[in-house]
Amino acid sequence: MKQFLSFVKKEFFHIWRDKSTLLILLGMPVVQIVIFGFALTNEVKNSRIAVLDPSKDASSLAITAELDASRYFDLEKNLVNFAQVEEEFRRGKIKLAVIFPAHFADDLQHFNKATVQLIADASDPNVANTLTNYATAIITDYQARITGNKQLPYTIQTEMRMLYNPQMKGAFNFVPGLMAMVLLLVCTMMTAITIVKEKEMGTMEVMLVSPMRPQMVVLAKAVPYLFISSINIATILLLSVYALEVPINGSLFLVVAESILFTLVSLSLGLLISSSAGTQQTAMFISLIGLFMPTLMLSGFMFPIENMPLPLRVISNIVPAKWYYLVVRSVMIKGVGLQEIWKETLVLFGMLVFFLTLAIRKFKIRLA
Amino acid sequence: MPEKVITADKLTKRFGDFTAVDQISFEVEKGEIFGFLGANGAGKTTAMRMLCGLSMPTSGAATVAGFDVYRDNEKIKRNIGYMSQKFSLYDDLTVKENMQFYGGIYGKSDAFIKNKTAYILDELHLEKEAHVLVRSLPLGWKQKLAFSVAVFHEPGIVFLDEPTGGVDPVTRREFWNMIYQASDSGITVFVTTHYMDEAEYCNRVSIMVDGRIEALDTPGALKQQHEARSMDEVFLKLARKAKRGEG
Amino acid sequence: MRTLKFLLQKEFRQIFRDPAILRMILIMPVIQLMVLPWAADYEVKNIKLSVVDNDRSEYSRKLIHKITSSGYFSLAGYSNSYSSALADVDQDRTDLILQIPPHFEKDLVRENKAVLYLALNAINGVKANLGGAYLNSIIRDYNREVRAEWIQFPRFSAETQINITSSNWYNPGMNYKYFMVPGILVILLTMVGANLAALNIIKEKEIGTIEQINVTPVKKYHFILGKLIPFWILGLVVLTLGLTISRLVYGIIPAGSFTTIYVFAALYLLAVLGLGLLLSTFASSQQQAMLISFFIMMIFILLGGLYTSIDSMPAWAQVITKFNPVSYFIDVMRMVVLKGSSLADIRGHLLAMAGFAVFFNGWAVISYRKRS
């Protein structure tokens, strides 16, 4: 045990000496959580639109003004002919075009009927869909107002309650996801690279001839990163509560404990990668390029897992970040306790045991 | 009057308030084997890096092959070979590919590269290993190969930074034979080492202590001055004055 | 020129000598491109619905039937009380609760007015918003049907009506893959390009071979070009592989020309590689380079406009996206692949990218020092 501690001490010295790396390690999560916590939102707003309005009468101008005034749209341009619609779309200037017919108000008055055409740039189908919905709602509202507030008979009213996140803040969804990404990638990359670097430089052999068990040598390298991650967990949580106003509705202790468990999973994944990578480049390739996109896309915080086709829903189960994201979201935002998330916790624990056993066994084989 | 190929006048390098090299002055003649001795951290490597144009001097003057180290460092590079302390061949290239590469970036013709490669492989008895990755050669062979590559383009001066570190005595012997050969063919050799027996092989040696040159003469003269039987003793007497960290 | 030839020869030899890394460079993006786009689907469907039906009338049953047969909702089950339904939301067994109060049918028929209560899991705001909107429109439809049962038809024909027709240009099938696949390709290309170039130079630093190069008369820009060109070619190979997969697996045929894509990509790769080179002149170890690269990649990718709309970001974040090469390429891909934009249409993007390329590479050449 005393030997183990002296190895851990040596690793701490390595990290402490390299002040610039340490600064990046501790500062990066702060910057990331702040930038993304504020910048990322699934909401669609301030989309640029163009209007083609040959009638320019009271009704069409009123609708245009209402669209522009809403938080969803910014009027970019008044078009003069239909050909311009295509041109604006192709240059990527606008997301939606609103086209009024000639004599819009006249039609409304005399025939009680007029048509507005909406053309959306569906190259991003999600945005197109949402914008069409918003614009339709605004125009329908306008229509309701000119019809007058007649009370219609047999009316079903709905009352909607937004649970957990009444202000619909993007941060509620993204913060738990970002925590998963940052913790996983930083821990995995750092352990994988430090160990492979020692292999590459040949200093690993020096340590392996020491009386320490080789597995212990490798474990000792992961300990300082566990420590650094704990600091990161603390700063991330403080930032999300005080800067991003994401609540911790459940037990703080549970959030921290689960985060540490997840850190351990990431560290052991790093160990596993280091046991099979021969060069730092390979280790980087697996831990950064190999993990980044799958974690981002399959953990459930960008795209709902239930929408994915079956094979991907199955694959998503082996993404550790998925389980952590579920846990953090449930504890922080829904405020549930361990009895609701014991299954997810068990999966994470199982992953930890699996990665660690595999990594240690691989090191043994290599050394035998 | 022999030609002076390296001159240094009060050459100094400071890193912050640490003076790594402190006003050293010396001259090296053409064809000479000039030994640069000193304990670890005495400033040998820093001095050599300034002469090779890898490090900018803080003050003082120096010329190498007639070129000023401040202004003409790129011209100097055309006229020198260098073998660094770290092993500096590409270990994922073969023996032949390394030679081809370094010959190529010094602007040698294909014919020159071909002939010289064949010559060196023959000299080192490495014909069979021509297509072997450098990674898989034993350390001694690698060092000899590194030296051959450093003089591949036939420079006027070659700088060797502790070229025999970690090499067995037999290989060291062979290595020094290669240095003599190069010297015979008119190449000036500037070599740092902390093996004192190697100092005996040099025409002249300078001994650096704490960034300054404490002694400079032929090995024989130095032994006489300090009433010592070997260079080892000379060195120990001088090095005892050192104040810096590990000596 | 001759020097460059030898530098290139050496780089290519080293790349091909390590088949493991070469295989990863080529295969990893291919696999990810084949798998990941299937996950990208913002379309809201299969929303899990719990019903608390305290009325159990014919009307309430009809309403539930109408909702579940719409295709957007799947019935997760009936609950006896709101609180037990809420517990289901806690455990992610349901997303949306529809509570039908007692006397719903009676209120509607006798009082002309009835209220339904909806509660949605709003952690993911978009899903909640859209789910709520869908449910509301189904309920409105239902309301109209109920009204039609009781009221004679012609009575409302005098109502003023604005007809709204909508069309979706460039992607009428609303196929999300047309948008995601090129975007993911851009991201993979960026990660491969920037990281490989950066790590390659730092490796030479760590091993010490770079010093051996520094004492040779090799010119700085020769050295940089020697590193740039091989990875530039490799990047174009990855791009070609990616476009082939887009064609074969996803059936994506760009509406615009391949020339436009390649011209932009060639410029883009120069910029990204330049960034990698710049990174390598500052980082002292591969570990440090990777950390910085992770940080930059995270910003590039999450603020690239692929996952969330740039227009919706706060003003300061939109400023950041102006300095993000990824957002330009994603935009260009979207324009060329779906809208058929030509080189003339993307001239602004080309100019910006040329600016990035000159800036990053220029800075890299300046800050790469042969002498310390």
Image (spheres, coloured by chain):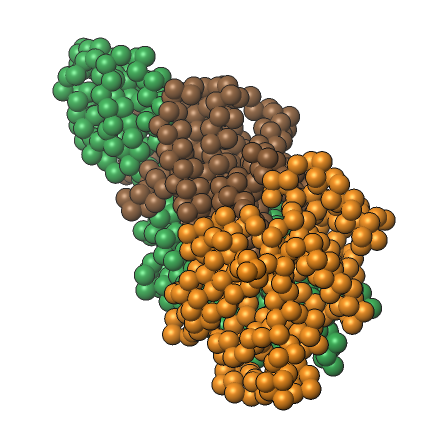
Chain colours: A green, B orange, C brown
Residue at the outermost front position:
B1
**Res A191 visible:** yes
Q: Would you say A116 lies left or right of A362 here?
A: left
Q: Quadrant of the C terminus of chain A?
A: bottom right
Up-down: is B190 above or below C192?
below
Between A14 and C65, the one lying in front of the other is A14
The residue that appears at 79% across and 44% down in the rendered structure is B118
Residue at the outermost right position:
B128
Q: For the image shown, how many numbered marks are present on the structure?
A: 0
Residue at the outermost left position:
A58
Up-down: is A53 above or below B178?
above
Up-down: is A218 above or below A4?
above
**Res C193 visible:** no
Between C364 and A285, the one lying in front of the other is C364
The residue that appears at 49% across and 53% down in the rendered structure is B66
The residue that appears at 49% across and 85% down in the rendered structure is B243
Q: Would you say A57 lies left or right of C132 here?
A: left
Q: In the rendered image, which quarter is residue B174 located in?
A: bottom right
Q: Quadrant of the N terminus of chain A?
A: bottom right
Where residue B127 sits: x, y (%)?
Answer: 84, 48
Between A181 and B28, the one lying in front of the other is B28
Q: Would you say C58 lies left or right of A113 here?
A: right
Where residue B207 sits: x, y (%)?
Answer: 56, 76
The residue that appears at 19% across and 20% down in the rendered structure is A60
Where residue C35 sits: x, y (%)?
Answer: 62, 39
